[in-house]
Image: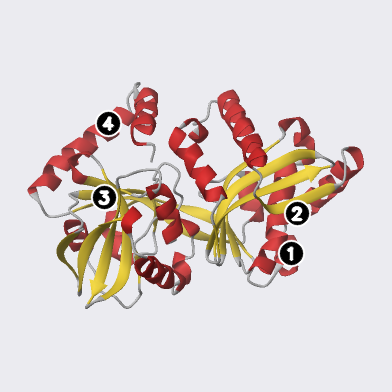
Amino acid sequence: MTTGRGAGDVRVRVVDAAAMSPALVAAWARVQESDPELASPFLRPEFTLAVAAIRSDVRVGVLERGDAPVGFFPFVRRFGAVGAPVASSVSDCQAVVIAGDVAWATRDLLAGCGLSGMEFNHLLASQAAWAGCHGRVAASPLIDLRLGYEAYRRERREAGSEQIRKAEGLARKLEREVGPIRFDPCSTDPADLAWLVERKRAQCEAKGRTDAMSTPFVRRLLDRLLAVREPGFAGMLSCLRAGDRVVAAHMGMRSRTRWHYWFPCYDESLAKYSPGITLLLRMAECAPSMGIDSIDMGKGDAAYKQRLMNASVSVCEATAWADSPMASMARWIVAGRHSLRRSPLSGAARTLQRWLSAA
């Protein structure tokens, strides 16, 4: 553990994430739950602890006012002391988890954590302290269920979206032609996860997409999250069956109030029935009964997200720098890495980076 400079009216100390005390974890959970903008399960302490159980380099900057922890900043330190979010290759929401009445400054926070800079790819754009560091901003579509599923379903129909009506018709056809539909929102069967991973990898290979499942880190993380069942956080493996056949599955996470739609997959031989959309709608239908008031579908402009969303949260790419000689050197390193990504060698560079850092 190290102690750094003050950040606004607080001081910063850095702790090994895996060594956090139960009291510190509980304080983190309280701060996270105090602000609806921090509802994402990626911002829960349990997610960082799951990553820290696999990787030894996960740190947390603890912001303290007096003797009380008021903020938490999970990160990993890379070459040149440039920080990155925990599991940044698969993290869809990043922020400092901090109480709203706390004054803090980004450069002081970075210096307190011993960082020359920090790179984000899904930073909450609403966190004003980082505003001067923002790059590209994008919407992460939400399904807002605060009024319940039937109110959401009605609102989408009145907005002119036929997605839900069509999906319901296809689900009835799936039942007639394949078998009765059964939905399990939270399977604990490793075989269901293996089904998802196998088909997700095959689909990525067939479509030439980046295969996150190919990295050992991601596979181990999903296995670990599958076993986490806490009141404020859980890994959520959802399965849709027609008869005895798995037709769609999804591995995600939930906080107390938000479900994150993360790794979905469906049986492509049954694509004409849209089983993936049926699975997502069954998730939305049962979410309110679990205390969940929104589903974050993740950044992207896929047609089904645009048709099903009725709200959104803004996330952005961002790079922030501390005031230090090391930061000047790190800027050159980061600029060189970005140039490499734009070169013909970018594919090989990304593959190498995933295998070396896996986060």
Identity of the amino acid at label 4?
Ser
Q: Residue at x 52, y 66 (%)?
A: 232
Secondary structure of residue under mark 3:
strand
User: Which label sits in the foreground, 1 or 3?
Assistant: 3
Residue 145, position as x, y percentages in the image: 64, 66
Q: Residue at x 34, y 36 (%)?
A: 357
Q: CA distance from mark 1 to mark 3?
A: 43 Å
User: Which label sits in the foreground, 2 or 3?
Assistant: 3
The residue identified by callout 2 is 164
Dot 2, how many residues are within 10 Å of its Cα: few (below 14), some (14-19), or many (20+)?
A: some
Relative horizontal placement of residue 156, taking residue 294 as reference (left or right): right
Q: CA distance from mark 1 to mark 4?
A: 47 Å
Circles 2 and 1: CB atoms closer than 8 Å: no
Dot 4, how many residues are within 10 Å of its Cα: few (below 14), some (14-19), or many (20+)?
A: few
**Residue 118 tag number:** 3
Of label 1 and label 4, which has the lower sequence position? Answer: 1
Of label 4 and label 3, which has the lower sequence position? Answer: 3
The residue identified by callout 1 is 158
User: Which label sits in the foreground, 1 or 4?
Assistant: 4
Q: CA distance from mark 4 to mark 3?
A: 18 Å
Of label 2 and label 1, which has the lower sequence position? Answer: 1
Relative horizontal placement of residue 73, taking residue 276 as reference (left or right): left
Residue 69, position as x, y percentages in the image: 29, 72
Circles 4 and 3: CB atoms closer than 8 Å: no
The residue identified by callout 4 is 339
| Quadrant showing the C terminus | top left
Circles 4 and 2: CB atoms closer than 8 Å: no
> As displayed, is residue 106 above or below residue 170?
below
Q: CA distance from mark 2 to mark 1?
A: 12 Å
Of label 2 and label 3, which has the lower sequence position? Answer: 3
> As displayed, is residue 121 above or below residue 13?
above
Secondary structure of residue under mark 2:
helix
